[in-house]
Amino acid sequence: MPILSSLVRAALFVSDLERSERLYRDVLGLEESYARNALQNAEFAALLGVPAAAAIRYSILKMPGPARGMIGLFEVRDPAPPVLRREPGQCNVGEVALVFYTDDLEHYRQRLEDFGIRYVCRPLVLSVRPGQANLEMTFRDPDGVMINILQKDPLDLDA
């Protein structure tokens, strides 16, 4: 049977590469730049389903360590792709949410509010099983991507 790896990278198509880098790198802390480039390449454009002459800039960010769980930010121009229509205060069919764990949700709540994020759900306690609960919040990045950050219950850290 063929082997498929675990998820390597989420690719996000963004309207402003630098603004998205500020959120994912400076606010959320994806520290390392795995790759950053600008190109006009017919094969790469074909992979993205955009015209061969489109201008593509990208930045792939990751946490220190293995090249897994990376976030690829891709800005396409000339022409720019259409913007997805989403209901901002709820999930939408076909939508993806990025999920991160933290040991200090309050730290990220303050940083995200300073950045000007739009909440889907402000921090709340979510009971995951009797006697255990996580502190979680959900918000949208500047292009509407849903992100969930959760602080796991100390009793559940190995799960």
Image: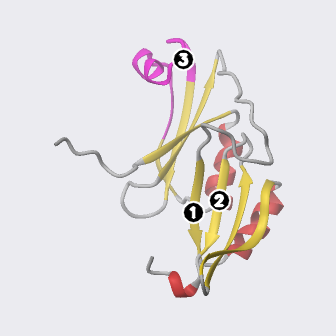
Q: Secondary structure at mark 1?
A: strand
Magenta highlight range: 36-55
Q: CA distance from mark 1 to mark 2?
A: 6 Å
The circle on residue 100 is 1
Dividing the picture into quarters, in which one does residue 148 lie?
bottom right
Quadrant containing the C terminus is: bottom left
Residue located beneath label 3 in the image: 50
**Which residue is pictured at 49% across the width and 12% down the height?**
52
Tell which tag, 3 or 2, sits nearer the viewer: 2
Residue 91 on the magenta segment: no
Residue 100 sits above or below residue 87 on the image: below
Q: Residue at x 45, y 46 (%)?
A: 9
Marks 2 and 1: in contact by CB < 8 Å?
yes
- Direction from residue 119 to residue 25 in the image, left or right: left
Residue 15 found in image quarter: top right
Q: Is residue 139 above or below residue 78?
A: below
Q: Earlier in the sequence, mark 3 or mark 2?
A: 3
> As rendered, which of 48 and 138 lies closer to the eye?
138
Residue 42 x %, y %: 43, 15
Residue pointed to by mark 2 = 148
Residue type, mark 1 in image: Phe
The amino acid type found where label 2 is placed reads Asn
Q: Earlier in the sequence, mark 1 or mark 3?
A: 3
Mark 3–mark 2 Cα distance, whole angstroms, equals: 29 Å
As drawn, is 74 to the left or to the right of 23? left
Whole-angstrom CA distance, mark 1 to mark 3, is: 30 Å
Numbered disc 3: secondary structure? loop
State whether residue 29 is above or below residue 130: above
